Image: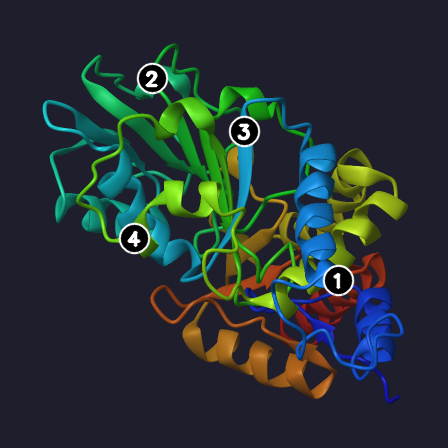
Amino acid sequence: MGKRAYNFNAGPAALPLEVLQQAQEELVEYQGIGMSIMEISHRSKEYEKVNSETQELLKELLGIPEGYKVLFLQGGASTQFAMIPMNFLKPGKVGSYVMTGSWAEKAIQEAQLIGETHIAASIAADRPLYMPSQDEIELRQDAAYLHITSNETIAGTQFHKYPETGNIPLIADMSSDILCRPIDASKFSMIYAGAQKNLGPSGVTIVIVKEDLLQDAPKTIPTMLRYSTFVKNDSLYNTPPVYSVYMVNLVLKWIKANGGVAAMEQKNIEKTKLIYDAIDNSGGFYRGVVDPGSRSTMNITWRMASEELEKAFVKESAQHGFVGLAGHRSVGGLRASTYNAVPYESCKALADFLADFQKRNG
């Protein structure tokens, strides 16, 4: 195998090398059954074991208490933007949203097609990028739920303290930071995440939902857009994304074998500090765009003096084996996505490259 790239893609993103190697070994024949796991029935005992084991691993790693269901759906977080109001936004209620960036905005736009929405907080345009604090969030008592995006992948912002919502259900899109740190899962009525950043490859969406939230859902929702469909059938109502769930299973085992979520958090802090320090200590050559109190440990964003210099940085970094350092097309700039599977060595290499590029171009 040739030298692996320094993969800082935002998603689909880096996977642990050990996971890829195990998947490679099992690709043609899964555990002696004479077939690939991609070839077997989702009703088979082999896949049902993967299905149930993956659910239990998620519950264990996230500390999910009794009274929650773990579901494997398709359509990414983008489908969840519509499913949430379809299932939970009842007449006489409003869907409350914290507007923190591009992904929160997409969720709001879908909800507005379905029912009444309320912006509980919105970031100010005249400030560095940040996440709203508790006292900035307006909680309405007629709210069906409060929806947050725990980590804005494009902006590089992250909630470091989740809102307290009392008896109002808290729903979080954790697509880009699930399992990066321990959380109190009992604070949430629902957590959802596309797998392709911290959980595995694209193709499966994880939904962790409190059973109480599922009561009295409208009966007019199409079958495949009802959470109850997947709860009743253990995510096996139709053919699930078998291989993606299998890969999530391997990633969860990798996290567990490497110390669990607490160990992931410590490693993420150590490796992202290398890059943030290189930005902060550059004397303004690199400029972080996020308020320090809201900086993400998953997506690091920064700017340079000109777009021409940024383009030169991306071009030269690619020549040195770095992938995915251009910012999102909607905002430009630069971004390094440092998910759980991105190794310390890659972050150290990027910090060194940042210093070297500045030395030669500053």
Give coordinates of residue 10: x percent, y percent. 55, 64
The mark lying in front, picked from 4 and 2, is 4
In the image, is residue 133 above or below residue 48?
above
Which one is earlier in the sequence, the residue at label 2 or at label 3?
Answer: 3
Q: Which three-letter amino acid code belongs to the residue tagged 2?
A: Ile
- Mark 3 is surrounded, within 10 Å at the Cα level, by few (under 14), some (14 to 19) or many (20 or more) other residues, namely some
On the question of residue 122 being in view, the answer is no
Tags 4 and 2 in contact by the CB under 8 Å rule?
Answer: no
Q: How many angstroms separate mark 2 from mark 3 (CA)?
A: 17 Å
Q: Residue at x 51, y 49 (%)?
A: 193
The quadrant in which residue 38 appears is bottom right
Q: Which mark is residue 168?
A: 2
Q: Secondary structure at mark 2?
A: loop
Which one is earlier in the sequence, the residue at label 1 or at label 3?
Answer: 1
The quadrant in which residue 163 appears is top left
In the image, 160 versus 110, the foreground residue is 110
Tags 2 and 3 in contact by the CB under 8 Å rule?
Answer: no
Q: Residue at x 77, y 59 (%)?
A: 250
Q: Which three-letter amino acid code belongs to the residue tagged 4?
A: Thr
In the image, is residue 183 above or below residue 360?
above
Q: Secondary structure at mark 1?
A: helix
In the image, is residue 66 above or below residue 77?
above
- Mark 4 is surrounded, within 10 Å at the Cα level, by few (under 14), some (14 to 19) or many (20 or more) other residues, namely few
Which one is earlier in the sequence, the residue at label 3 or at label 4?
Answer: 3
Give coordinates of residue 96: x percent, y percent. 24, 29
Q: Which residue is mark 3?
A: 68
Give coordinates of residue 126: x percent, y percent. 28, 40
Q: Which three-letter amino acid code belongs to the residue tagged 3?
A: Tyr
Q: Which residue is mark 4?
A: 223
